[in-house]
Structure formats: structure tokens, C-alpha cells
Image: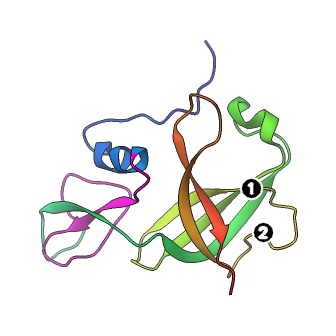
Amino acid sequence: MSESADPIVNDLNRPFWDGAAEGRLILPHCAATGAAFWPPSPISPYPAGRAVEWREVDPHGTVLASVIYRRPFQKAFAGRLPYGIAMVALDCGSRLQAHVHAPDRPGAPRSGSRVTLNWEVLSEGGPPILVATPILN
């Protein structure tokens, strides 16, 4: 059995992956408070409400932390070494992980960097993956 980096898509996260296929970042929101959250849940995690709505969010945020992999965590990414992963606090309040291209290069996103999250297909036939791209001033 070969390892796959493909996401597990189910009824709970399908809107997220449908948005990815369209190049849009869509997250669940509490219908009562309007607050975005991740990971998805069938009910809002906020005390004020239970209903969930999926909405597109602004893909801008700040890198909280990042790591550079020099040994593959997943075999599917072995050919991309070194590769980086960043934890990004989106301006809407949610946090997501994103790939970082060439994390050793000058100007690559680091803690405190402002970034935009974009969807990219990193391997032929593979799923779209969030990539953190630095916002240039």
C-alpha cells in the first residue's frame, strides 16, 4: 500500500475542499456570532449558537510558527526537500497550516511574517494544498 497525501474528504469538511477546487478559502462560521473556526464541526463551538454556515474568508494572516523538514515527514513530499510548514493566524481569527516553498531562501515566511494563503497543486494529479506566500510591502 502506498502512502498518499490526499485529504480525507467527508460531509463535515466537503465545503472546504470544494472551495479549494475553486481556489477559494472557505471556513465554517458560527451562525449566531459570525466567528470563523477550524477544524470543522457539525455545531458551532461558541456558546452563543449551534448552527454552522460556510463562508469565504480573506486569505491574509500572520505566521505564528514554522518548521523546515529536511527529512520527509510524508513520502509523498520526499522530492520537495527541504520543505516548510507554517501555522498561520488568519485575520478572521482561525488558524491553518500551509506549505512554504523554499523555506531556506531569504524572504521566506517566518514567525511574524504577513502572508497570503493560496491554493496550489504541488504534485501532478494531487490535491490543492494551501501555500503561504509573503506579502511584499
Query: For the point 54% across and 59% down, which residue is it?
Result: 118
- Give the amino acid type for the residue marked by disc 2 in the picture: Ala
Residue of label 1? 101
Query: For the point 61% across and 73% down, which residue is it?
Result: 115
Horizontal side, residue 99 vs residue 35: left or right: right
Residue of label 2? 108
Tag 2, which secondary structure? loop
Q: Position of residue 107 (x, y in %)?
A: 81, 73
Q: Are marks 1 and 2 in contact (CB under 8 Å)?
A: yes
Quadrant that contains the C terminus = bottom right
| Residue 108 picture quarter | bottom right
Q: Position of residue 72 (x, y in %)?
A: 78, 38
| Residue 3 picture quarter | top right
* The magenta stretch spans residue 29: yes
Report the magenta stretch's main SS.
loop
- Give the amino acid type for the residue marked by disc 1 in the picture: His
Tell me which label, 1 or 2, sits earlier in the chain. 1
Check disc 1: other Cα within 10 Å, few if <14, some if 14-19, many if 20+.
some
Q: Nearer the viewer, residue 52 or 56?
A: 56
Cα–Cα gap, marks 1 and 2: 8 Å
| Residue 109 picture quarter | bottom right
| Position above or below: 22 against 59 | above
Q: Nearer the viewer, residue 106 or 23?
A: 23
Query: For the point 58% across and 33% down, which residue is it?
Result: 5
Horizontal side, residue 3 vs residue 22: left or right: right
Check disc 2: other Cα within 10 Å, few if <14, some if 14-19, many if 20+.
some
Tag 1, which secondary structure? loop
Query: For the point 54% across and 64% down, which residue is it?
Result: 117
* The magenta stretch spans residue 33: yes
Range of magenta residues: 22-44
